[in-house]
Image: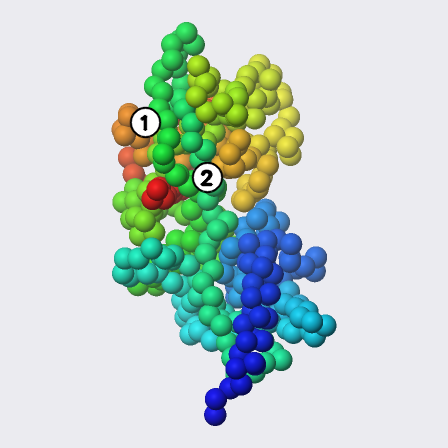
Amino acid sequence: MKRPESQEKLFAQVIDAATPKVLELWERADRYFPKTGLKCDEEIIHEKTVGKTYYQCNPHFWQCYWQGGTQEYPSIEIDIFGQKFHVTAKANFDPLPALSSSPRYYRLFKRTSPGINLTYGYVVELVVNEIPGLSQPLLLTDSCRDTYLPQRIYGYEKIKDKREEGFIWDNFDRHLFLDKFYVSNRQVNEWRLLIGEDKKIEVDRKKWPMPALLDLKEQTAYCHFYGKRVLEAELFDAATMSPTDLKNPTPDRIYRPQTPWQRDLSKTFLGLSRVNPDYQLTPLDCQLAQVQGCVGTFYSTDSASWMGLHFALGFYPERLQNFIEPKENLKMSSRFHSPASEWHELGYRSHWNGAQAESLPVAFRCYEEAPL
């Protein structure tokens, strides 16, 4: 029996009205985090050392929310012409045995054929409780992952003589999107599932927010799978060295600040630590740059650079592709060096041979160049 056209039209109206709230739940999941904590240990084991930003655009939070991990009867309420409707997600997808035995409220998606539409994301299915028998698929994307690098002239690396201009480049007519955070174990797990390497996933849920420690070839393969590349050294410098004049994309001179938050390192806790061996680190210091002596935290947002990239100094060593100086492929500033270390300065790099080591675990991130 054919469904009345008016009912289908009403269903479409409700879904259309609910879509902004659906996207808010997806992109701003930290706002939905209950004070009493989550009740979905199969999906999330929340640690106080993990910032709630981690749950934005996170399919595990989406799964947790709809299976009742934040409230008993989750729904999105919509009012249309004085009538209330309740939109919910449907557990209409097969379990992922490597992760959980529960039916899924999402399905991992990766386009296998060329096209101008979205190439990867998470397929979900929405229903309206008051209009049974109809459902609407929706593709959610990780819109929280990256940040745009403005088009302007940039400098690369440190210069020994401040009277020199050094290596200068620009990204005019290029649309570059850089990962805000390191690639996490959760993200690599999804990649493993999509390429059929279920046995290689990280099963310890407490480690899912932590940086993925892949070897050099796997880092490259991960980024390439999503049409991206491992972040390059000049892009890292551009994203972390704050321009003196944000309004002028073609300044006469390019300056290279020593830290992301203060041009002069001597005025920061890193500079003070070099002249005062008894300097006591504060919580704010560790949020800006997690160095030796700080408690390990992940997805903290106080470390953001001028254009939204995190962990410019401190935290983990980071691999950077470097086509200008191939051997200078590692940001050494990290939580494994004391705050007085000379590595804690923008533009200083070392070499990584591509193999992970317990004494020097190396994180990475990707970037994407969108077509004009």
Decide which of 189, 144 is in the foreground and name it. 144
Secondary structure, mark 1, is loop
Q: Is residue 251 above or below residue 350?
A: above
Decide which of 14, 68 is in the foreground and name it. 14
Secondary structure, mark 2, is strand
Residue 148 is marked as: 2
Q: Could you tell me if the residues under marks 1 and 2 are in contact, i.e. CB atoms within 8 Å?
A: no
Q: Earlier in the sequence, mark 1 or mark 2?
A: 2
Which x, y percent locates residue 103?
48, 74
Label 1: few (<14), some or many (≥20) within 10 Å? some
User: Residue at 56% across / 81% down in the picture?
Assistant: 7
Q: Is residue 91 visible?
A: no
Q: Amino acid at mark 1?
A: Glu
User: Residue at 29% across / 38% down in the picture?
Assistant: 354
Which x, y percent locates residue 296?
55, 41
Label 2: few (<14), some or many (≥20) within 10 Å? some
Q: Amino acid at mark 2?
A: Tyr
Q: Which residue is mark 1?
A: 328
Q: Is residue 198 visible?
A: yes
Considering every residue shown, the one lying at the far top of the view is 163
From the viewer's perspective, tell me whether residue 216 is left or right of residue 256. Answer: left
Considering every residue shown, the one lying at the far front of the view is 6
Decide which of 84, 142 is in the foreground and name it. 84
Q: Classify residue 369 by image quadrant.
A: top left
From the viewer's perspective, tell me whether residue 314 is left or right of residue 218. Answer: right
Q: Is residue 299 above or below residue 79?
A: above
The CA distance from mark 1 to mark 2 is: 24 Å
Task: Tell how many labels.
Answer: 2
Of the two numbered discs 1 and 2 in the rendering, the one whose residue sits closer to the viewer: 2
